[in-house]
Amino acid sequence: MAKEKVILAYSGGLDTSCILTWLKKEFDYDVIAVCCNAGQGDDFEAINKKALSTGASESIILDIREEFITDYIYPTLKSGAIYEDDYLLGTSMARPLMAKKLVEIAEEKGVYTICHGCTGKGNDQVRFESTIHALNPAIRIIAPWRSWHFHSREDLIDYAHQNNIPIAQSTKKIYSRDENIWHISHEGGELENPWNEHLPTIHVLSKTPEDAPDEPTYVTVSFEAGVPVAVDGVKMDPISLLTKLNELGAANGVGTIDIIENRLVGMKSRGVYETPGGTILYHAHRDLEKLILDRDTLAYKKIVSQKFAQLVYDGLWFTPLREAISAFVDVTQEFVTGDVKLKLYKGTAYPVASRSEYSLYNEEFATFSADEVYNQHDAEGFINLFSLPLKIRAIQRQAREGVPQSQKELGEKVLKGGDFVE
């Protein structure tokens, strides 16, 4: 009788390496390991060999980098979504795509059980499982961290040693990391005490600001309809563009944050995130929008951005609301085309120049010099109408509190449009 099959979301790291062995030893599953290449700096050939050597019946490596950028990163970038004003959603954006790929493989193989290595305290369990439920509710989910007898990664390290599972972690270097082409996150270890300053040695992608060059680097990013398409005038495909900006940002210490965030499951957590290229793109895109979008659209888009960020963080990518917000965002991005020049220096990335054929900035209107397109006298009527509610309120207050008759008459005269000169 054939063994029951299970699709395992596999990374080759501590958790999923132990899970693969655990599934086989405890339940005699036929495990199909699926690893998604989202741009993490891993040796995927080694991961493939490790999965097979530790008991997987099949190992599948999927390159999802370009789809991740175009279908998940770019819509989020265009929306301006930043979770709690800090987090650029690197892990959050990747999970729904990974879960979607797991469902596709499961359907292709005729397998109706998916296993993941997310902990019962984290957000990723929600992101994976919400996506699976949204795409195929018939699939059963196994989440070992919510059912097995292990309680910590120290327990898993012992289990790995007992079962001859090769791992890179040790009890002295036990950070939980997640990396893709957008960012790398670090959690655990000494970071769990928020009074501990994170050590410079934690950095994987970026230099610290102190070690960055003493001279600034300038870079120009070009956008078409809100999507980055070129760096320094050179057109690039999505992977090459983001890789180039990662290199520039990392060399200048750009994009590292150390934050306390509110997890979806109800607790606070502390993480260090390195997002060099993504930080450059966010600053550039926001600056270009300021040049092109009108005030009301910008203001309303900020409200929408906050909701978009929450939806992505909470794993609700495949929902009608997220899709509707993306449709709104796409309309706002129709004319967000142009170039932004940024100065990268000692951990900062700030725009210094921008241009667009769709710019709403007009030097003829904005100049303090003489011009023929703006009649400054017109401002008087605008101000009178704009401040009319304030005038009425003040006159009513004076009437209640009592004011000299002459002042009262003057106020009524002004309200009727008279001048101040008797």
Image (cartoon, rainbow, N blue to C red):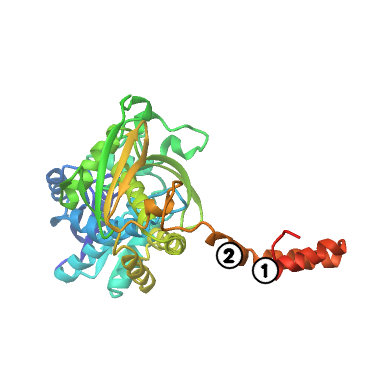
Residue 108, image x, y percentages = 15, 70
Q: Is residue 29 left or right of residue 255?
A: left
The residue depicted at 81 percent of the width and 66 percent of the height is 409
Q: Mark 1 sits on what residue? A: 417
Give the alpha-carbon distance from disc 2 to disc 1, as whole Å. 10 Å
Front residue (pair 416, 70): 416
- Mark with earlier residue (2, 1): 2
Q: Is residue 384 left or right of residue 303?
A: right
Residue 333, image x, y percentages = 31, 62
The residue depicted at 28 percent of the width and 43 percent of the height is 277
Inspect the image, locate mark 2, and give the three-letter code of the amino acid beneath it: Gly
Q: Is residue 418 left or right of residue 285?
A: right
At mark 1, the secondary structure is loop
In the rendering, which numbered label is found on residue 180?
none
Residue 352, image x, y percentages = 35, 40
Question: In this rendering, is residue 401 above or below 189?
Answer: below
At mark 2, the secondary structure is helix
- Does residue 353 appear in the picture of this structure? yes
Q: Mark 2 sits on what residue? A: 381
Q: Quadrant of the N terminus?
A: bottom left
Using the rendered view, name the quadrant where residue 408 is placed.
bottom right
Residue 351, image x, y percentages = 35, 42
Front residue (pair 390, 421): 421
Inspect the image, locate mark 1, and give the three-letter code of the amino acid beneath it: Gly
Mark 2 packing: few (<14 Cα in 10 Å), some, or many (20+)?
A: few
Q: Is residue 304 left or right of residue 1?
A: right
Q: Quadrant of the C terminus?
A: bottom right
Mark 1 packing: few (<14 Cα in 10 Å), some, or many (20+)?
A: few
Question: In this rendering, is residue 232 above or below 384?
Answer: above
